[in-house]
Amino acid sequence: MTNQTFKLISVNLAGSRLYGLDSKNSDYDYTVLYKREPEDYICFGEYKNFMDETTLIGSRETNYKYWDIKKFLQLAGKSSFGALELLYCTEAYFNNPVYQYVLSEVRKENFDLRELMYHSRGIINGKHHRGYMKAFHFTFIQYLLQHKKLPDTLNADTMLNAVEMIDHLKTHIKRIFQAKRNGIKDMPFIVESYSDEDFKYLPKMRYIDYTRVLHRCIFDF
């Protein structure tokens, strides 16, 4: 890896600042897309398709997660929430021709709602995720179920205001979101284990093969 050349494609804001749940002391989280030289993709065996880096700017920690373009396209083809998140970023190198091409091919409407809901259900039922993340993904599922499409933004308040929900549950979620903005990350999301009864009967996803997109990103730019 040390002798390989990396070319930056985009820098994408992620995490609580993308969701509008950041506090004054929140870290900055970015996912960075990059590509390598064409010959670097022709190799025996697997290669490391991501890197992690944490830096300190002033008193705030900034977390950079580096994804090879191949990794991103593979995850997008599987309707991964992590890949979807990159399409909602508010800070990126939009003038990069590779990134513009990727955005023209990997669109939000390509993502499978059923698969995204299964991902969010896993967050809600997981033991190691904080309450605000569980509440965020619960709200995300409700938006998908009620509107049958992806939201225009991943802002937590905007999604919550756009769904119908039992009053006490919506109030509970609002308190969790506000607590996160006040720096309290561990306020629990109190809800029964989330089942898949609402969406398990939806048609199974169709994997999207972005090989053609990968080849063009590697060879044409």
Image (cartoon, rainbow, N blue to C red):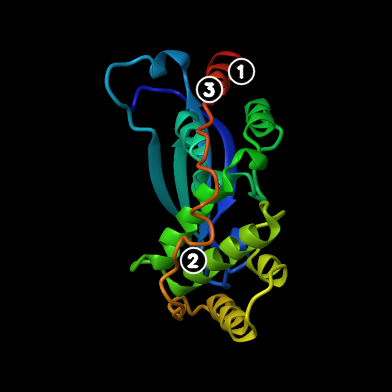
Mark 1 lies on residue: 221
Quadrant where the image shows the C terminus: top right
From the top left corner, tell me how far across and down residue 109 is, in percent: 66, 41
**Dot 1 or dot 3, earlier in sequence:** 3
**Dot 2 or dot 1, earlier in sequence:** 2
- What residue do we see at 44% from left, 80% from top? 188
Comparing labels 2 and 1, the label whose residue is closer to the camera? 1
Q: CA distance from mark 2 to mark 1?
A: 38 Å
Q: Is residue 104 above or below residue 38?
A: below
Give the residue type that dot 1 points to: Phe
Give the residue type that dot 2 points to: Ser
Q: Secondary structure at mark 1?
A: loop
- The one nearer the camera, 166 or 17, is 166
Comparing labels 3 and 2, the label whose residue is closer to the camera? 3
Q: Is residue 54 above or below residue 6?
A: below
Mark 3 lies on residue: 214
Most extreme residue toward the left, as rendered?
45
Mark 2 lies on residue: 59
Give the residue type that dot 3 points to: Leu
From the top left corner, tell me how far across and down residue 58 is, in percent: 51, 62
From the top left corner, tell me how far across and down residue 199 is, in percent: 53, 56
Circle 1 packing at 10 Å, graded few (<14), some (14-19), many (20+), is few
